[in-house]
């Protein structure tokens, strides 16, 4: 197949991400630590993807590669139909800024910034003027139900509220896809549901591809597809609407 | 990232830790403070020294008598030989013939011992010409200056320096004018008091403030050129013959000063073959020398102070490195949210520059206050040159760049994943 044909196919199939035999090996001195051992996968626009697997199976590593925070040691990664290998550090930063939203287990909010300032951070790096930033931050805060806490600082908020702010921040530049590494890992069941509801709502408009790592088998039903990782390879792929749902 | 956001962010981070920022920039504060104070003090000293010389008049050449060491000492013998040395009336007349010399003021020390009770005083009885007052930049405080009539009449009058009252008379209320000073049989009536505020010091004769000045004609009439000089400390003193102690030679134009000094020098060399019993000083040359020495002094002082700036800079670098380590998670998060390496680098660099600039500004205030205190308590003159302030601001900026670059680079090189992994 020629290159242009592949591209055409990608476009028609709404491909956001394609991994071809991705490997990631860490080197600790002379010791090789293979973490990802050949991953093939394709994510399409608007999909809600779950990644599950035992601790140490390489989930976070996979997500970091997806999010351009880390580069694979072998294999091909196409993001929005472009091969990542040749991207410069600056270009990757720009893509992280404009096309990728990160949600962390421990929220990673800036403790000294207010809620609205926290939401604004990615827009600061994309040089959006202050007025416009502020307006967008308020909209997003409203959207995650925290429009009344704009001038509070993260330390004054509950864990669930913090994660909602982090989601608002991740959405601020309208990313093509959202990466969440155990976003409910630090939250109790009730708050977890609130967060999942927000992600679920987001999924409804089918605009954003969401990739979420979780340990919780209970939530399987909200995903379109689930990838099960074991020892650095995809052990099992589950389509949505499994027997439990 | 917009420059305005970059500045706002760095400023915000500084304000977050006010005390820490202040403590961190302490090295810079004291560094800049000492640069400012040192420069102000040395500039002040320079100005004072130069003023003193310049006030004396850069259009003058000072020719003075030196007791030649060969014939000098009384060597504890009871017999004293007559010592004839120094500048003479003949020299004066010859010099007046020179084209570029417009005026000569002469001073002659009568070498009389002046006492109060049994205490010897360091006052000098000096006979001089009428132009003395103007040529030495003295001011009349009270009474009048010596007059042509005094000269013509060889009057027994004197004008005294401002220290004479304190030294010779008890500190009473009444005016000195009209008081009498008896010196070896002659009694001089005080007609005026003068003062010299520019620190003039004559070779061997010191300040006009410690002089009792009488007309040359009077001196010539009642004291001969000869006399006994007890200042050597010997019981019997030295029998001497000195005509003039000092000649203040004024030139018509400053441009000729070096040339004229040369000529006087070679004339005196020829005229005083016997011994080197004279000396010559050109204030203009002294001025240039002094300027040079003072410049070196300023550079040395400035350099010493700059060392504390470097130490301060290293301190800041240290803290910034710790700061980068402490804020790895922030850096990682920023990188994940789209910050480029360059954004991180600039953020930390500008934070450091803010830190040093703030230190610099506080340092300038400190330095100025310090020098004001010095002026107040030690009475040293200080001079603030605007360039010392510009220099300090520049140096603290440069210190910020020099010592901020490495920590900022370190911050930018942080691997975002490692940085995010830390809790
Ligand atoms: N920088 C690194 N250097 C060396 N080994 C690493 C590095 N990062 C991750 N690893 C190793 O890679 C493996 C996978 O790590 P990863 O964080 O992807 O696991 P995970 O599936 O996210 O686990 P968890 O569920 O506990 O978060 C682990 O064995 C880990 O020790
Ligand atoms: Mg993980």
Image (tube, rainbow, N blue to C red):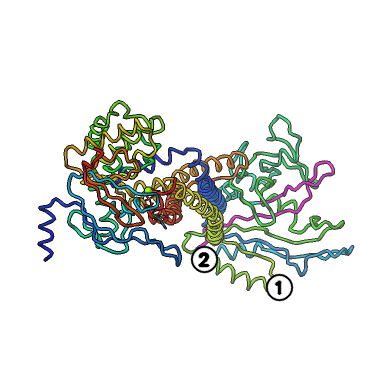
Viewer-closest of B234 and B94: B234
Residue A44 position within the rendered picture, expressed as x and y whole percent measured from the top left: 18, 49
CB of mark 1 near ligand 1 (< 8 Å): no
Residue B297 position within the rendered picture, expressed as x and y whole percent measured from the top left: 56, 57
- Mark 2 and mark 1 in contact? Answer it, CB < 8 Å: no
In this image, B256 relative to B184: left or right? left
Which element is circle 2 on? helix
CB of mark 2 near ligand 1 (< 8 Å): no
Image quadrant where residue B355 sits = top left
Provide the residue designation for mark 1.
B274
- Residue reaching furthest to the front: A243
Viewer-closest of B15 and B363: B15
Residue for point 52% across, 65% down: B258
**Height in image: B107 above or below B88?**
above
Mark 2 or mark 1: whose residue is earlier in sequence = 2
Which subunit holds the residue at mark 1? B
Viewer-closest of B100 and B32: B32
**Height in image: B21 above or below B72?**
above
Which element is circle 1 on? loop
Viewer-closest of A52 and A138: A52
In this image, A13 relative to A173: left or right? left
Q: Is residue B43 visible?
A: no
Image quadrant where residue B266 sits = bottom right
Which subunit holds the residue at mark 2? B
Q: Main secondary structure of the magenta part?
A: strand
Measure the alpha-carbon separation of dots 2 and 1: 25 Å
Residue for point 75% across, 40% down: B168
Provide the residue designation for mark 2.
B258
Please give the range of residues in magenta.
B100-127
| Image quarter hosting the C terminus of chain B | top left
Front: mark 2 or 1? 2
């Amino acid at each position: 197949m020629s290159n242009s044909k592949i591209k055409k196919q990608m476009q028609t199939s709404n491909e956001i991400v394609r991994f071809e035999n991705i490997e990631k090996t860490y080197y600790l001195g002379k010791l090789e630590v293979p973490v990802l051992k050949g991953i093939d996968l394709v994510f399409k626009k608007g999909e809600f993807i779950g990644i599950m697997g035992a601790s140490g199976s390489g989930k976070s590593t996979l997500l970091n590669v997806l999010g351009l925070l880390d580069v694979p040691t072998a294999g091909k990664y196409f993001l929005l139909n472009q091969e990542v290998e040749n991207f410069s550090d600056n270009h990757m930063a720009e893509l992280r800024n404009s096309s990728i939203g990160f949600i962390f287990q421990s929220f990673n909010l800036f403790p000294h910034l207010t809620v609205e300032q926290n939401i604004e951070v990615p827009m600061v790096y994309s040089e959006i003027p202050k007025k416009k930033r502020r307006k967008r931050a308020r909209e997003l805060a409203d959207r995650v139900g925290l429009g009344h806490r704009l001038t509070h600082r993260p330390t004054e908020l509950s864990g669930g509220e913090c994660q909602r702010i982090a989601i608002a921040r991740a959405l601020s530049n309208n990313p093509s896809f959202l990466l969440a590494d155990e976003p409910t890992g630090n939250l109790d069941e009730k708050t977890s549901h609130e967060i999942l509801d927000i992600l679920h709502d987001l999924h409804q408009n089918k605009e954003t591809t969401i990739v979420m790592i979780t340990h919780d088998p209970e939530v399987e039903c909200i995903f379109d597809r689930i990838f099960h990782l074991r020892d650095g390879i995809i052990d099992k792929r589950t389509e949505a609407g499994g027997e439990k749902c | 990232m917009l420059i305005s956001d970059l500045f706002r962010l760095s400023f915000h981070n500084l304000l977050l830790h006010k005390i820490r920022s202040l403590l961190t920039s302490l090295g810079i504060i004291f560094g800049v403070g000492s640069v400012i104070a040192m420069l102000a003090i040395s500039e002040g000293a320079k100005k004072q020294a130069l003023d003193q010389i310049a006030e004396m008049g850069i259009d003058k050449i000072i020719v003075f008598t030196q007791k030649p060491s060969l014939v000098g000492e009384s060597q504890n013998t009871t017999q004293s030989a007559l010592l004839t040395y120094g500048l003479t009336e003949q020299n004066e007349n010859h010099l007046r013939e020179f084209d570029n010399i417009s005026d000569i003021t002469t001073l002659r020390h009568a070498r009389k011992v002046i006492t109060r009770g049994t205490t010897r005083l360091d006052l000098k009885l000096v006979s001089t010409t009428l132009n003395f007052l103007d040529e030495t930049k003295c001011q009349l405080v009270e009474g009048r200056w010596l007059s042509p009539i005094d000269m013509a009449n060889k009057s027994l009058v004197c004008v005294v320096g401002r220290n004479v009252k304190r030294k010779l008379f008890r500190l009473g209320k009444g005016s000195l004018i009209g008081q009498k000073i008896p010196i070896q049989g002659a009694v001089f009536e005080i007609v005026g008091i003068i003062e010299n505020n520019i620190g003039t010091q004559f070779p061997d004769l010191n300040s006009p403030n410690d002089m009792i000045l009488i007309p040359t004609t009077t001196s010539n009439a009642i004291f001969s050129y000869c006399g006994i000089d007890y200042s050597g400390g010997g019981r019997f003193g030295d029998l001497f013959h000195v005509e003039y102690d000092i000649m203040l030679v004024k030139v018509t134009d400053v441009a000729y000063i070096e040339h004229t000094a040369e000529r006087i020098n070679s004339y005196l060399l020829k005229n005083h073959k016997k011994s080197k019993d004279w000396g010559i000083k050109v204030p203009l040359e002294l001025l240039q020398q002094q300027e040079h020495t003072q410049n070196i002094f300023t550079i040395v002082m400035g350099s010493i102070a700059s060392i504390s700036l470097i130490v301060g800079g290293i301190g800041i670098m240290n803290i910034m490195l710790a700061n980068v380590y402490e804020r790895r998670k922030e850096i990682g998060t920023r990188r994940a949210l789209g910050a480029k390496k360059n954004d991180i680098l600039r953020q930390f660099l500008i934070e450091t520059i803010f830190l040093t600039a703030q230190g610099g500004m506080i340092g300038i205030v400190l330095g100025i206050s310090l020098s004001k205190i010095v002026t107040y308590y030690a009475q040293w003159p200080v001079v603030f040159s605007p360039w010392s302030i510009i220099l300090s601001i520049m140096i603290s900026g440069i210190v910020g760049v020099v010592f901020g670059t490495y920590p900022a680079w370190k911050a930018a090189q942080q691997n975002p994943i490692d940085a995010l992994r830390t809790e």
